[in-house]
Amino acid sequence: MIQIQAAVVSDFAEPASYRPIEIPEPRAGEELVEVLAAGLHPRVRSGARGAHYTSSGRLPQIPGIDGVGRRADGALVYFALDDDRFGSMATRAVVDPRRTIALPEGSDVVRIAAAMNPAMSSWVALRRRITLTPGAAVLVLGATGSAGTMAVRIAKLLGAGSVVAAGRDPRRLARLASLGADVRVRLTEDLDATASALAGAAADADVVLDYLWGAPSGRAIPALLRARTDRSRPLDWIEIGSVAGPDIVLPSAALRSAHLRLIGSGQGSIGPREYLAELPSLVEAINAGRIAVETRVAPLEEVHAVWAEQPQPGVRTVLMP
């Protein structure tokens, strides 16, 4: 066993605390890396509550699903982990080299740690779950969150002709025009009015990137389908997140009366090899500044206090040992 310092979750109802913990020695084909930066993503928080659909329920747990590290030979790498027991929020982590990609020296480790996970959600969805036709019309539901904001930009980078951005935060919504949003729709508590507004703005969308799900999506899907000029035209509705709720109520007629294709995108629907194949081009886009991300950096030893704070909308927290 190897003793390290790490953020440790001992109770799913409590924030992580910084303390010593032992992790297993690398097995054959694995290696130990020095962790330089790890993102405190919403996905990390849900896993640390035992609430993510991939959670095994094992404790104690070191949270963190990815990060930037340095190998024993000095090489800088981005790494992803698939073990929910021993994660990346630690001074060192055991990684599978097949789940790492080399980073150029001089890469901004904070930007990479902050952006890879949220950017990957739309990048991989548009590259691996559907065939995005050049010039396609895309609707992003939940566009004022970090991942949704990146999705607006990524849709344009990958060839979308127009993007409708829908979100709650009016300040962030206003800024999305500069990132490629052609139309912006404010989401409100009035679900029927919001669904009507979405139908008016994106009735003929080709793709929906849905970070909301729940009641807003349950109302929006029938409204958009009823408003389509040609209901036989395919609409790929890609479910990525569920910040508005884990379930929807959808009339069966919605599936019969229009060419609706409901698709999920996440761990399980996309294999590790597919994810890894997309990482080099995504790293290049982040390093080149083509995908914007707002960051906040905090020392790993302050994880307990940071964890308990209310996350800032649109800002990704990165912990550094």
Image: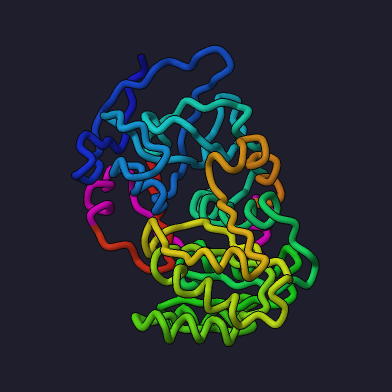
The quarter holding residue 320 reads top left
Residue 217: x percent and y percent?
46, 69
The quarter holding residue 189 reads bottom left
Looking at the image, residue 184 sits to the left or right of residue 274; the answer is left
Q: List the single residue furthest toward the right.
A: 134
Q: Residue at x 39, y 69 (%)?
A: 215
Residue 203: x percent and y percent?
62, 80
Please indicate, yes or no, whether residue 88 appears anywhere in the rendered image: yes
Q: Residue at x 36, y 83 (%)?
A: 190
Looking at the image, residue 18 sits to the left or right of residue 64; the answer is left
| Residue numbers of the magenta segment | 283-308
Whether 7 is drawn above or below 133: the answer is: above
Q: Quadrant of the C terminus?
A: top left
Q: Nearer the viewer, residue 314 or 233?
A: 233
Please indicate, yes or no, whether residue 174 appears anywhere in the rendered image: no
Whether 59 is drawn above or below 37: the answer is: above
Q: Quadrant of the N terminus?
A: top left
Q: Is residue 297 magenta?
A: yes
Q: Nearer the viewer, residue 137 or 68?
A: 137
Q: Nearer the viewer, residue 184 or 297?
A: 184
Residue 164: x percent and y percent?
60, 78
Q: Is residue 284 magenta?
A: yes
